[in-house]
Image (cartoon, coloured by chain):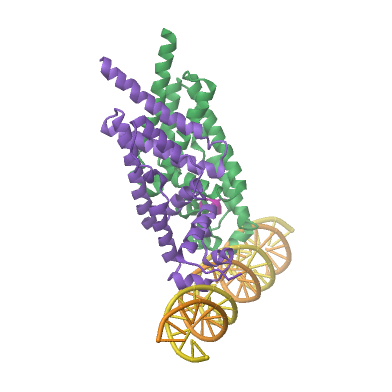
Chain colours: A purple, B green, C orange, D yellow
Amino acid sequence: MAAKRFGPRDWIVAALAALAEGGIEAVRIEKLARRLGTSKGSFYWHFTDRPALLEAVLDFWETEGTSLVISSADAVGSPPERMQAVVDAALLATEQGVDVARTEAALRAWAAEEPVVAQRVAQVDERRVSYLAEILQRMGYDTASSRLLGVGIYLALMGLYDARRYAPSLADDRAFRALVEGIVRSARASARASLTD
Amino acid sequence: MAAKRFGPRDWIVAALAALAEGGIEAVRIEKLARRLGTSKGSFYWHFTDRPALLEAVLDFWETEGTSLVISSADAVGSPPERMQAVVDAALLATEQGVDVARTEAALRAWAAEEPVVAQRVAQVDERRVSYLAEILQRMGYDTASSRLLGVGIYLALMGLYDARRYAPSLADDRAFRALVEGIVRSARASARASLTD
DNA sequence: CCGTGTCCATACGCTGCCGTATGGCTGCGA
DNA sequence: TCGCAGCCATACGGCAGCGTATGGACACGG
């Protein structure tokens, strides 16, 4: 029963879990230590202080916790198929054991209070929205409409993530799908129209 | 220069402002006292403890801070006009001096951690969504679609509120309007279709 | 003028968390 | 076997916030 050793990654994962459960205010070094079954001494060996941990958490999330961006790598299939794949990926409840909705929502609540965090989250959002807009454009929407609808879809997704945390009756995946389907349908309709015009 | 006296309402308003600015964790009795220019002694005269204040804040918000519900009172005009009015009201930046987006978003971040809060916020959400669904139904959507699209619109609005706090480039009112307009247009289209069928 | 009820100021003890200091344990290469 | 680097445990001082206790200040009716 060798006493376990802990690396920075263990602290980051624990911090991410605490963030998802109780918001950034719940990410407390001594709490994490208790949960991990170790002491602060370990933490301050791997990190200089709490802000350093929080920054590491942000880094981790940016590089390893962005399913929408990851799915943008395999950009195969027709636009509708790609949209379908993105929606399916976004609606997954958990990813590698972490609750996607709670994490994403908690991250944004945090961003609302820390400008530095806001900037980095907004940057990720921008990439995701750009990807959505690109798909929409390939469906036949003009540049401006694609952007607007991409933003709209993304906002609805963030709202859904939020709702999953407190309002099960609102957190209806079908509502989000209905929104996207309506947009996809309109694209087809106007494309058909432009053919028959 | 008579030293000001404070009633419960002063504390509630201050708490609501602090909530909008820094989340529920920023609602600290001693901080509010400093901001108001008084001391804790005053607070503990009017409230038994911090939970009592937070509950009063919730009550206050439910009764006086729900513009969407208020606008459901004047249910006049055609469905599209009513939808337009609701959207316009929802997109107002401030209401009686308080930042609507920050307040609504902070409230939901709070609800994510406190089941009691979650229940009450969800109740308000339910009423708002029902109102949206009712309008959509009058536009020609069937019951199920109305509900789904109403939820979708509402989720997007919550996402917009969230974005206003940290991502100005995403917080585009036109994106939300585009979403709603698409839905309204589809209603008209299918209504026309059902006439010609 | 005086008592009483209303409201606020201040001091106190308590708790949880931060970051530091210091010492102990463990494995490994010389 | 010894020494040393890497890693962890514990104790400490400090700070911020909670809720309580207690003592005014002030207005107002008798």
Instruction: In the rendered view, tell whether residue A42 sits above or below residue B21.
Output: below
Res. B39 visible in picture = no
The stretch drawn in magenta includes residue B12:
yes
Vertical placement of residue A183 versus B114, above or below: above
The segment highlighted magenta reads B9-13
Q: Where residue B62 sits: x, y (%)?
A: 56, 41
What residue is drawn where x is 44% and y is 64%? A53
Q: Give the camera-side residue of B175 and A9.
A: A9
Asked whether residue A170 is in view, the answer is: yes
Residue A192, given in percent of the width and then of the height, sits at: 31, 19
In reply to whether residue A172 is colored magenta, the answer given is no
Out of B189 and B75, give the one closest to the viewer: B189
Q: Nearer the viewer, residue A192 or D28?
A: A192
Return the x and y of residue A68 as percentages of the image width and height: 39, 43
Per the picture, the main secondary structure of the magenta-coloured stretch is helix
Q: Quadrant of residue A181?
A: top left
Residue at the spot x=39%, y=31% of the render? B179
Q: How many numbered marks, from 0 up?
A: 0
- At horizontal 47% and vertical 28% (from top left) the residue drawn is B149
Left or right of residue A67, residue C8 in this image: right
